[in-house]
Image (cartoon, rainbow, N blue to C red):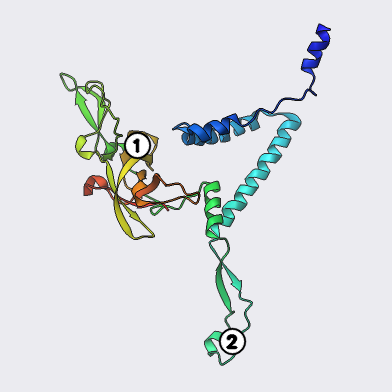
Amino acid sequence: PLEIRRERRRSPFTVTMPQNEHIELFQKRYGKRLDHEEKTRKKEARSVHKKAEYAQKALGIKGKLYAKKRYAEKVQMKKTLAMHAESDGKRKSNDEPKKGAIPAYLLDREQASRSKVLSNTVKQKRKEKAGKWEVPLPKVRPIAEEEVFKVLRTGKRKRKQWKRMITKATFVGQSFTRTNPKYERFVRPTGLRFKKAHVTHPELKTTFCLEIIGVKKNPNGQTMTSLGVITKGTVIEVNVSELGLVTPGGKVVWGKYAQVTNNPENDGCINAVLLV
């Protein structure tokens, strides 16, 4: 009987009890972790590399099927990008020609009306899916590390050269505590630290002085981003709660991205355009 019981337990036909939506219920009551979005984003970013690794290791029929699936996904992505690329399309208007005399120089022209091929919301979703964002400054001048990091000589004889002083504008959080100056590798001068930015809303044509939440992406590399260096073209996150922006769901938007459009180290202030 003991063996029969074990067999019953292992049987694949046993019906499992419903587990209810405990996770969803917990999230509704207490919310998600503060770094939930960041962790999800990183997991998605890693998934590409994991898929590629699996594709290289998979052998035989499994490898062939997986390659076919990946190929189909890539084709779909290329189609999405192509659809995103076409902003306007020319279509022949079905309207009947207007009665009356037409000037000679218009006779050979087709009656064409420019119409939007895709609606704005669909476009926006496709942009997000394709990871393609339109920014005010798509190309910026690359900055050499020698320009950003000034070598500080230390030691009794000034022979040690492992310290660097950042010569550009930087952002450090409210909870930032400077490490022991003796062991500090990157020195961020207090005079070049910024907490606020002048952000222009492109649709409202109005500028607001908003608090900076963090540096999202510096085009000059990950090192600059992690150090909070703000140069021309950097994407920063700003606190827009006072603007009263609301999502379609009715929630107040707290943070939004903006791109820096000036050289803060020269002007003494940060000017940015909100990415709507």
The residue tagged 2 is 98
Residue 12 at x, y = what percent? Answer: 79, 22
Image side of residue 121 versus residue 185, left or right: right
Residue 164's image quarter?
top left
Give the residue type at disc 1: Met
- Residue at the (21%, 29%) spot, across then down: 152
Residue 159 at x, y = what percent? Answer: 20, 22
- Residue at the (83%, 11%) spot, across then down: 4
**Label 1 residue SS:** helix
Residue 62's image quarter?
top right
Q: Residue furthest bottom?
A: 101
- Residue at the (55%, 47%) spot, across then down: 129
Residue 172 seen: yes
Residue 126 at x, y = what percent? Answer: 56, 51
Give the residue type at disc 2: Lys
Image side of residue 20 versus residue 169, left or right: right
Residue 146 at x, y = what percent? Answer: 28, 36
The answer to which of 37 and 166 lies nearer the viewer is 37
The residue tagged 1 is 224
